[in-house]
Image: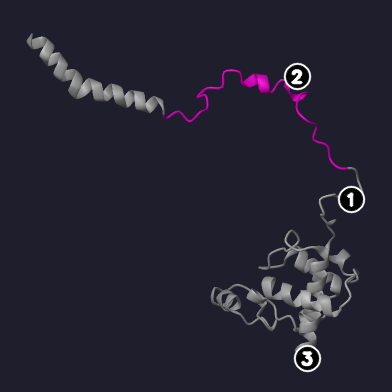
Amino acid sequence: MQLSSHLRRLLTRRALPLAIGVLALTGCNPGAYPFDYFREMHYQQSQHLLEPQRLSPPDGSVPRTGGRPQISFAGARDLQNPVRSTPDTQKAGVALFKVNCAVCHGAAGNGESFVAQRFTANHFVPPADLASSRVRNRTDGELDWIIDNGIGGMPPFRDLLTEDQVWALVNQVRAVQGQQR
């Protein structure tokens, strides 16, 4: 009788919590097999035939997702701005500049902003003064390329802005340059 009470106490104090803990831990399975028994099946040629082919697009094809073809900086030099400067495009350029450019280049485009101060304080090249001779001497195509692809600490805007929006920003940069002469 003493053995059974001793056994009962042992079960309730040690073995039962241990059993509950083991059962709880079995529920902590990550959902993947710890060992891939049939890993070779996925790598068989017969399985590859069931997967879709990964083909490159033909040369000279035009993307349907709205993407623009990549060109080099030198190739962009001769690009002409297809967006004429009208009151509507000027208004769009000002709005785009305020949202995308002013935070770094300053509201006046003179390169004076909080971000420029932080860049200078941390020994980074600050954003450009858009009326400087360096920027003024760039062609419209070069400005388009820089806005699209970024340069130095400037991020690329290719995936954020449409082609017409980028050209409207080029017009806005030219307007800023005219105001700061």
Which numbered disc flags the more N-terminal residue, 2 or 3? 2
Mark toward the start of the polypeptide (2 vs 1): 2
Labels 3 & 1 near each other (Cβ < 8 A): no
Q: Is residue 84 left or right of residue 162?
A: right
Residue on which disc 2 sits? 46
- The residue to which callout 1 is attached is 62
Q: Quadrant of the N terminus?
A: top left
Q: Residue at x 74, y 78 (%)?
A: 94
- Mark 3 vs mark 1: in front: 1
Of badges 2 and 1, nearer the viewer stands 1
> Real-space Cα distance between discs 2 and 3?
70 Å
Q: Are marks 2 and 3 in contact (CB under 8 Å)?
A: no
User: Which of pointers 3 and 1 lies earlier in the amino acid sequence?
Assistant: 1
> Dot 3 corresponds to which residue?
181
Residue 86 placed where, x, y %?
A: 86, 79
Three-letter residue code for mark 3 = Arg
Residue in front for this viewpoint, 139 or 65: 65
Q: Taken as a whole, is the magenta stretch helix, strand or loop?
A: loop
Instruction: Identify the residue shown where x is 78% and y is 78%.
Output: 91
Q: CA distance from mark 3 to mark 1?
A: 41 Å
In this rendering, the answer to whether 43 lies above or below 94 is above
Identity of the amino acid at label 2? Ser
Q: Inspect this view and state whether residue 162 appears.
A: yes
| Secondary structure of the residue carrying numbered label 1 | loop
**Residue 7 screen position, x and y as percent:** 15, 14
Question: With 38 as the anchor, is 87 left or right in this view?
Answer: right
Is the residue marked by circle 1 packed among few (<14), some (14-19), or many (20+) residues within 10 Å? Answer: few
What's the magenta region? Answer: 28-57
